[in-house]
């Protein structure tokens, strides 16, 4: 069966520090991968998605970036965090072959910027 | 621009009664719709889905209804249980299958 791992679960970082959140998927190949952010009291905002290694699409301008160095690995990064980057970050995957397949989410990372 | 909207941020229902969560969308090209359930500090869990060729899909206590002409989606939970208390997100995708658009969520509280 497929599983998705996301870490760390919680992270407290000072303003201006770098960020690296990692997500890996097991049990499937060539998945579509996604990074979302859920800010307090708001829905899920799509940040990035990837349909293959090295292929990244960005949905919103920001100081975050994403990379997909391997088929089942998706990394969210920042060189200098802002206070507004605080939130709950979620990684998700969906089947890369065929349509009408649901996304499956990791357990999320609670990021607090001080 | 929010293409998928959940206009009720919260809903309270008595245990055993029906919970009805609503969702509206603006893009008529959406052809796949999903409901997710989310507990605090956890990722959303896929609950049920429906494709645009259907108007109803049922899975146990959960039924999703789709009204394409009204661009409206609803989730019915019967009977509601205290463990159903969570935030429910509706989502929609285009036939390209790569992107999903989420509503802002409805917090359901089932009162014992």
Image (spheres, coloured by chain):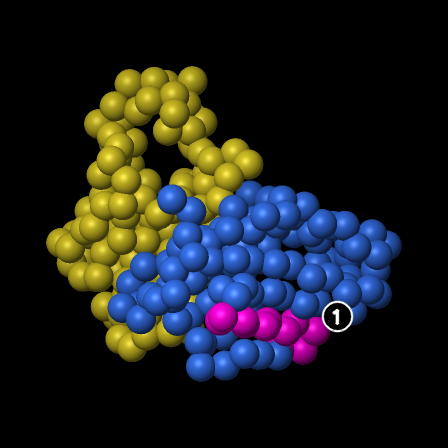
Chain colours: A yellow, B blue
Does B64 appear in magenta? yes
* A92 lies left or right of A29: right
Magenta span covers which residues?
B59-69
* B4 lies left or right of A77: right
Is residue B67 placed above or below B12 in the rendered structure? Answer: below
- The residue at the far left in this view is A54
What type of secondary structure mainly makes up the magenta span?
strand
* B40 lies left or right of A67: right
Residue at 47% from the left image edge and 58% from the top image edge:
B25
Quadrant of the drawing holding the N terminus of chain B: top left
A51 vs A1, nearest the viewer: A51
The x and y percentages for residue B68 are 49, 71
- The residue at the far front in this view is B69
Q: What residue does disc 1 label? A: B78
Does A100 appear in magenta? no
Q: Chain of mark 1?
A: B
Residue at 83% from the left image edge and 52% from the top image edge:
B111
B60 vs B25, nearest the viewer: B25
């Amino acid at each position: 069966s497929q599983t998705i791992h996301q870490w760390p679960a919680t992270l407290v970082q000072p303003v201006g520090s770098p960020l690296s959140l990692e997500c890996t998927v097991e049990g499937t190949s060539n998945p579509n991968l996604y990074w979302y952010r859920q800010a307090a009291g708001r829905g899920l905002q799509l940040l990035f998605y990837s349909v293959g290694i090295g292929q990244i699409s960005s949905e919103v301008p920001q100081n975050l970036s994403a990379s997909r160095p391997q088929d089942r690995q998706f990394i969210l990064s920042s060189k200098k965090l802002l206070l507004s980057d605080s939130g709950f970050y979620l990684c998700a995957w969906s089947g890369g072959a065929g349509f009408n397949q649901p996304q499956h989410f990791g357990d999320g990372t609670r990021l607090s910027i001080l | 621009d929010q293409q998928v909207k959940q206009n009720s941020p919260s809903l309270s229902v008595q245990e055993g009664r029906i919970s009805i969560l609503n969702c509206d969308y603006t893009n008529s090209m959406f052809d796949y719709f999903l409901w997710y359930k989310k507990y605090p500090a956890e990722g959303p869990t896929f609950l049920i889905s429906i494709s645009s060729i259907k108007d109803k899909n049922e899975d146990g206590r959960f039924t999703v209804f789709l009204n394409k002409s009204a661009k409206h989606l609803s989730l019915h939970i019967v009977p509601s249980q205290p463990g159903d208390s969570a935030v429910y997100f509706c989502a929609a995708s285009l036939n390209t299958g790569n992107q999903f658009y989420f509503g802002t969520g409805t917090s359901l509280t089932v009162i014992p």
